[in-house]
Image (tube, helix red, strand yellow):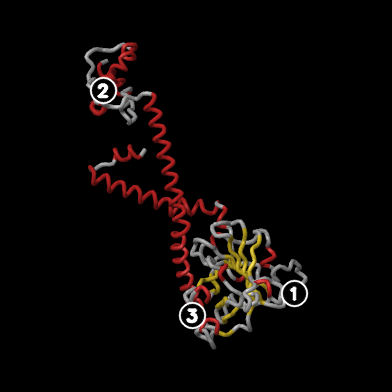
Amino acid sequence: MHGDGTRVAARESPDSDQPITDQVSDADEGQVAARSGSRHGAPKAPRRRDARRSGEGLRDGSAAGKKPRSRADLVRTGVAGLGQTLITFGLVVLLFVVYELFVTDLFTNQRQEELTQELRENWGDDPTVSGPDLPGGGLSSIPLGEGFAFIRIPAFGVDYVKVVIEGTDPDELEQGPGHYVDSAMPGELGNFSLAGHRVGKGSPFLDLDRLQPGDSVVIETSDMWFTYVVLGDPTTGSFDADPSGIPGLEIVSPQDVDVVFPIPGVDDSSVEPTAAYLTLTTCHPKFSAEQRLIIHAILNGPGLPRADYPDGPPALTGG
Amino acid sequence: MYTWIWRVLPGGLPGKLVGSLVLIAGVSALLLFIVFPWVEPMLPFNDITVE
């Protein structure tokens, strides 16, 4: 009876924040009682149920200076808990932004380095074998997620080099610019189309909107350099003034798949492409997926063998 | 919640500080390496392809 009374008292102790289990020991009760500041660790007399009830207030009162669990305290605890939850949620969202903007860059850059090394090794192992990246080599011959070419955009700096990966699923795009699997290969007649992230994941296409007509986009395959130039009129800077009628830069809705058709914007499969185009797609505006920013370019001259131009085509060497 | 964590962390003030940092690092790593990569594909703002 003695112990019972103590246990009940401890469990009902208004000041203990810790849940008191039924297995609570006498020592624990002592602690709880001590912490709560009450001196009733060993009640002098056995209490009747009603006495305990009515004595509750008195005991609380005797625990002077400590917080009795009144209704106001419950409200305070609830509000504090809600506040902490909201702050925690805010911090998590903030951390997610940091993740999107910076941490994914680290992941992607590391992956790009690995891919670069793999690709260089593949190409270096046996230069006489033409890899699956050759024009006309067959679209299905490149496994999804495998790097098969480098893209360089001199306007973004001499150190702008990214490995192009086959496929445009999220798994591929988080590694680098991805090639639309049904589109042409580098140098082929048709439309060599790539998608890339605008912000985060290495941000390969962050500055696509800064490209000007006539800017070069250089694609390096296992044995060739292909130099594409952004469509439009370089003298006026107008993207829409290209003789082909295809704009160098356009902003479209995500459903406008005709930008990656063999002839950009021509939704007619019976018309055979007579030129080799390059199309880059990314999201627009930044941080949004509302629209797509599209760059169209056209192959400038024939591809140059890497054997003859080890340092790159004139667009890269400034010649 | 934070009050409770602070109270149950052992080792006096230094121990509590170290314990807090370890907990923060652990939770951050869990979020950055497991939760965020998992949740990211379900969010809409990473669509960059036309389809």
The alpha-carbon separation of the residues under discs 2 and 1 comes to 90 Å
Local packing at callout 2 (Cα closer than 10 Å; few below 14, some 14-19, many 20+) is: some
Q: Which mark is residue A63?
A: 2
- Quick check: marks 3 and 2 in contact, CB under 8 Å? no
Query: Tag 1: residue type?
Result: Glu
| Element class at badge 2 | loop
Q: Quick one: which residue is furthest to the front in this view?
A: A236
Residue depicted at x 65% and y 75%? A232
Viewer-side residue, A311 vs A214: A214
| Element class at badge 3 | helix
A318 displayed left or right of A60:
right
Tag 1, which chain? A
Upstream in sequence: badge 3 or badge 1: 3
- Quick check: marks 2 and 1 in contact, CB under 8 Å? no
Q: Position of residue A273 (x, y in %)?
A: 72, 75
Residue depicted at x 45% and y 70%? A113
Query: Tag 2: residue type?
Result: Ala
Tag 3, which chain? A
Q: Which residue is mark 3?
A: A124
Q: Which residue is mark 1?
A: A272
Local packing at callout 1 (Cα closer than 10 Å; few below 14, some 14-19, many 20+) is: few
Instruction: Confirm whether circles 3 and 1 share one chain.
Output: yes
User: Number of marks in the image?
Assistant: 3
The alpha-carbon separation of the residues under discs 3 and 2 comes to 81 Å
Foreground mark, 3 or 2? 2
Residue depicted at x 44% and y 60%? A102
Q: Position of residue A109 (x, y in %)?
A: 45, 66
